[in-house]
Image (cartoon, helix red, strand yellow):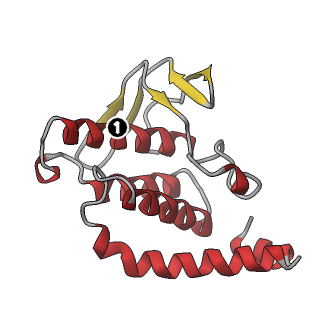
Amino acid sequence: MPFKTALSLAYSGGGEYVLTAPLVYEGATDTIEVPTGFVTDLASVPRLFWALLPPHGAYERSAVLHDYGCAELSSARRLGIPASLLRVSPRDVDGLFRRCCREAGVSLPARWVLWWGVRLGALANPARRAGIWRDLPVMAAVGAVVLAAATASLLGLGWVVQAVMGW
């Protein structure tokens, strides 16, 4: 697995955690190290959806790496550094999150819903918005599936969601 270290966290309150040891991810060409002391909220899943996708799970390390990438993008934006000069683009930060979820064994439906959520969040964040237009058709398709699953669940057809989505 590309993560070379285990996730070591301490709860700091208010839904936030602090890394107590570095988290190292090694890709094909780059190594990304999230430093000790980095603050994360793990997966930023709205509480309403915690029954399906809790903030903790197989995607924890992926979420920490994603939070770190987002923090780097925000920092670069504050400093006036254009996204085109960064090692990882806003679109790549979200794509890396999905890939790390796959590598962690997160189910196909869950990782696409998680990716859809982070891309949706990118719409509201100027530091992460670059390249969003290329993903809008896929986001619309995933959104339709999410809406159908939510509707089935509300209609008392949770077993359908479980069978189709694998949750």
Locate residue 148: give its quadrant: bottom right
Q: Position of residue 19 (x, y in %)?
A: 49, 23
Q: Is residue 108 left or right of residue 121?
A: right
Q: Is residue 123 left or right of residue 31?
A: right
Q: Is residue 145 above or below residue 30?
A: below
Q: Nearer the viewer, residue 32 or 67?
A: 67
Q: Residue furthest right?
A: 156
Q: Is residue 111 above or below residue 29?
A: below
Q: Residue at x 61, y 80 (%)?
A: 145
Locate residue 152: give its quadrant: bottom right
Q: Position of residue 122 (x, y in %)?
A: 38, 57
Q: Is residue 65 above or below residue 135?
A: above
Amino acid on which disc 1 is placed = Ala
Q: Residue at x 58, y 68 (%)?
A: 108
Residue 45 seen anywhere in this rendered image of the structure: yes
Q: Position of residue 118 (x, y in %)?
A: 46, 57
Q: Residue at x 32, y 46 (%)?
A: 27
In the rendered image, the quadrant that contains the C terminus is bottom right
Number of marks in picture? 1
Q: Residue at x 56, y 26 (%)?
A: 17
Q: Which residue is mark 1?
A: 71
Q: Position of residue 21 (x, y in %)?
A: 46, 19
Q: Is residue 60 above or below residue 99?
A: above
Q: Is residue 21 left or right of residue 165?
A: left
Q: Secondary structure at mark 1?
A: helix
Residue 2 seen anywhere in this rendered image of the structure: no
Q: Bin the neighbour count of mark 1 within 10 Å (Cα to Cα): few under 14, some 14-19, many 20 and up.
A: some
Q: Is residue 13 left or right of residue 134?
A: right
